[in-house]
Amino acid sequence: MIEQVDILRKDFSTALPCIAQKLSAIGTVLRNHDRIDFDAEDIEALGAMVFEEADDLKIIARALYGD
């Protein structure tokens, strides 16, 4: 989660590595889809995680570049 102070300072040096790590983990799971038994809830959870990270990236983009 991005802290308000990070937004005000436009310093995302903590948030960006966390986002990258989460997206990398999601990518690893998806790349290994043939070895993992997914059910609908698993897919929904992965989708929710992707959207959470997308929301954080939108916050960063707005802070850096405006609307």
Image (cartoon, rainbow, N blue to C red):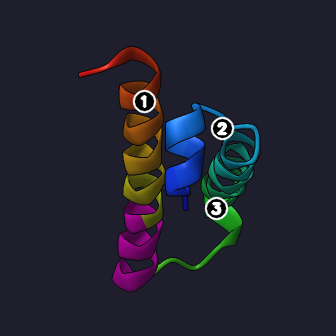
Answer left or right for 53 relative to 6: left
Residue identified by numbered label 1:
63
Residue identified by numbered label 2:
12
Front residue of 5/30: it is 5
Front residue of 58/54: it is 58
Label 1 element class: helix
Answer left or right for 49 relative to 24: left
- In three-dimensional space, the C-alpha distance between marks 1 and 3, rounded to whole angstroms, equals 39 Å
Label 2 element class: loop
Mark 1 or mark 3: name the one nearer the start of the chain: 3
Mark 2 or mark 3: name the one nearer the start of the chain: 2
Q: In which quarter of the image is residue 59?
A: top left
* Residue at horizontal 37 percent and vertical 36 percent from the top: 58
Q: In this view, does 52 lie above or below 15?
A: below
Tell me the kind of residue under disc 2. Phe
- In three-dimensional space, the C-alpha distance between marks 2 and 3, rounded to whole angstroms, equals 35 Å
Give the label on residue 34, or none: 3
